[in-house]
Amino acid sequence: MILILNPAITPSDAAYQTLVHYLEGLPGIRVQSHVIQGEERRLTELYLLGATSTLDTSVMAGFEAVDRVIRVSEEYRILGRHADLSRRSGFEYQGLQFNQSSFHVFAGLCAVDHREHVEHMMRALKAAGQQCTRMGAYKPRTNPYAFQGHGAECLPYVFELAGKYDIKVVAMEITHEDHITEIESALEQTGNPTGVMLQIGTRNTQNFELLKSVGRQSRFPILFKRGFGVSLNESLNAAEYLASEGNSNVIFCLRGMKTEGAAPHRNLVDFAQVPLVKRLTRMPICVDPSHSVGDRGRSPEGVLEIAHAAAQGVVAGANMVLVDFHPNPAEALVDGPQALLMSELEPFLEDMARCHDFFEERVSIWTR
Ligand code: PEP
Ligand code: MN
């Protein structure tokens, strides 16, 4: 059950305290508070977790602090949209809004290799007016002898360079809870010049213990990748692990499904599910065309297949694009064949911005 509080209510109000005192007295019920910072107002939601089936919605609605009561279904209790289509989504991080209407491109290196490449990328992003990037430091690899990422060692220069080029958010995959501490201390050491979005990779979608640890911290938002070989329902339930531990600042990323049917692409593009995930949940939706398509091929018209795939997601309402670039893909230590060239950054960004505008036009056609 979710109690949406009156926007004017704050935790210091007597009405708030009366409600919380009552809720704390309910046996077998855990209360989790979640504040949603919209562009204009702050909204507090209280999630009641546990044995909620016997609770009476009209009793809850009778409290002065309560605006609306939503009884939620069993699945994705916190991240789900449930019956109330008007519920807000998203969060603010580093002064940027991430919700089901916002749009950001996170272009960057699949894996950090050399400082010069990181600087080259960030300089190009700043010149293109971008404030977000992706930088992989911990790389889960199929082959144990393959480059595993520079790990903690590269974090200080990645963060310093992000600060130097006004990059506000760096998306970075972690594969172990210790990596969160490493990221925190590198940020501390460098004077917090940027923010980090913790990425859960497709290979860890159902690593529930990792999800619980990441969900227990509230400092960093989370970019959660769909599992490449499990159902959508299983991936959404896995994302809910993050929220059930307390962190519901989660972006859900579609990144293609592993099937022979995708060949010669790396994975089968699943971006038709962007609107579906938006309808089922309140998470902002990201698409990763690089790991879906897997190479720099172009259609006969001269457009990159990676851009075509990204466009499919964005005209359908995706809120974020995660995409691999590299100053010299031949030298990239991970995923060189799918990295776009620096000369392709500007056309890619323009293409995506126009696709997002076209999505908004499409909405107005269908809602007039
Ligand atoms: C990545 O984004 O670098 C990555 C490894 O992606 P995925 O987990 O989707 O394979
Ligand atoms: Mn990769």
Image (tube, helix red, strand yellow):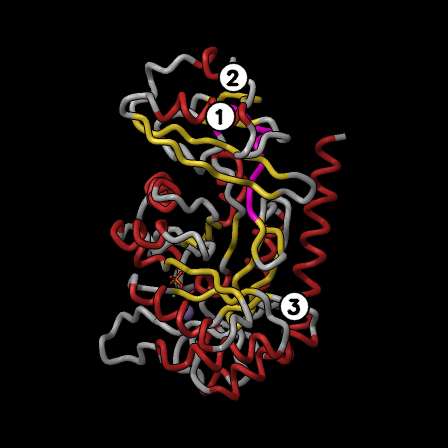
The CA span between labels 1 and 2 is 10 Å
Q: Residues within 10 Å of mark 2 (few under 14, many from 20)?
A: some
Amino acid type at circle 2 is Phe
293 or 314: nearer the eye?
314
Q: Residues within 10 Å of mark 1 (few under 14, many from 20)?
A: many
The CA span between labels 3 and 1 is 37 Å
Can residue 206 be found in the magenta stretch?
A: no
Residue appearing at x 48%, y 64% in the figure: 196
Can residue 86 be found in the magenta stretch?
A: yes
Is residue 138 toward the left or the right of residue 17 in the image? left
Q: Are marks 3 and 1 in contact (CB under 8 Å)?
A: no
The percent coordinates of residue 275 (x first, y second) are: 55, 40
The percent coordinates of residue 126 (x first, y second) are: 66, 74
Look at the picture and state if 106 lies above or below 210. below
- In the rendered image, which quarter contains the C terminus? top right
The tag on residue 3 is 1
The percent coordinates of residue 241 (x first, y second) are: 33, 44
Is residue 289 toward the left or the right of residue 213 in the image? right
Q: Residues within 10 Å of mark 3 (few under 14, many from 20)?
A: many
Amino acid type at circle 3 is Gln
- Label 3 vs label 2, nearer the camera: 2
Q: Are marks 3 and 2 in contact (CB under 8 Å)?
A: no
The CA span between labels 3 and 2 is 45 Å
Magenta residues, start to end: 82-91
Residue furthest to the right in view is: 368
234 or 59: nearer the eye?
59
Q: Quadrant of ligand 1?
A: bottom left
| Disc 3: which residue | 130
Q: Earlier in the sequence, mark 3 or mark 2?
A: 2
Q: Are marks 1 and 2 in contact (CB under 8 Å)?
A: yes
The tag on residue 63 is 2
Q: Earlier in the sequence, mark 1 or mark 2?
A: 1
